[in-house]
Image (cartoon, rainbow, N blue to C red):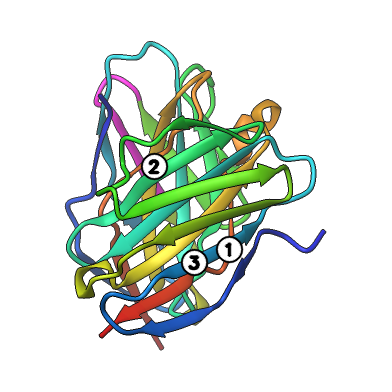
Amino acid sequence: DAGVIQSPRHEVTEMGQEVTLRCKPISGHDYLFWYRQTMMRGLELLIYFNNNVPIDDSGMPEDRFSAKMPNASFSTLKIQPSEPRDSAVYFCASSLAHQGDYGYTFGSGTRLTVV
Amino acid sequence: AQKITQTQPGMFVQEKEAVTLDCTYDTSDPSYGLFWYKQPSSGEMIFLIYQGSYDQQNATEGRYSLNFQKARKSANLVISASQLGDSAMYFCAMRPTGFQKLVFGTGTRLLVSP
């Protein structure tokens, strides 16, 4: 199994531009999570999906952020327009409900820099 | 709501020694799971160990063990025989049983010296 795959690994963009982060979860996993990691706020859960349906998006900071999961093997996190304070590492993770004692499997993250 | 507290921003240990990383939690849920993750400088998050709140014995995984004291609401990670490759950030996390949302602490940076 290739694990959770995120792309791109690094993204540098100018303020005001649209940014799209991509994630491919582990095949068969029924939960997908988007986290953001910053020095100031640590690891924050932005949104998570169960069977492609958004369950809790209370962590999404603003309307500029949106996430979709059109099918079981793909999810996107979009920021439009991007701002310098969005600079962070964004992690995608997936899990299988019946393997709760293994926690999540994380992707390698996308380091976003907005200049 | 759940809360995880890691009071040690940084810890130092010499190679081959044991080290304990502290984690306390707060929850009103009767059943929950506790997790530790390692984040090396390369940035990935690596699952280390899990403890269920109703597990009778402390969890162990190789050199990692979890010192679980339910009454004190603590779930400390013990790393035995530290290695240079153990230098990393370590995060404690928890979630109520039946729910998928993991709440993380702020992390402890461990530095292992030769």
Decide if residue B19 is in sight here: no
Residue for badge 2? B93
Is there one chain holding both mark 1 and mark 2?
Answer: no
The residue lying toward the viewer, choosing from A30 and B70, is: A30
The answer for how far apart the CA atoms under marks 3 and 1 are is 7 Å
Nearer to the camera, A94 or B19 = A94
Q: The numbered mark 3 sits on a residue in which chain?
A: A
Discs 2, 3 touching: Cβ within 8 Å = no
Counting other residues with Cα less than 10 Å from the Cα at mark 2, is it few (<14), some (14-19), or many (20 or more)?
many
User: Toward which corner of the image does residue A95 lie, by quadrant?
Assistant: top right
- Residue underneath mark 3: A20
In the picture, the disc for residue A58 is: none
User: Which residue is most to the top?
Assistant: B30
Query: Where residue B30 appears, x then y in whole percent?
Result: 38, 11
Q: Residues within 10 Å of mark 3 (few under 14, many from 20)?
A: some
Q: Indicate the amino acid at tag 3.
A: Thr
Amino acid under disc 2: Ala
Residue B41 lies, in percent from the top left, at 43, 79
Residue B75 in magenta stretch:
yes
**Subunit under mark 1:** A
**Horizontal arrangement in the rendering, residue A21 relative to residue A5 (left or right):** left
- Start and end of the magenta stretch? B70-77
The residue labelled by disc 1 is A22
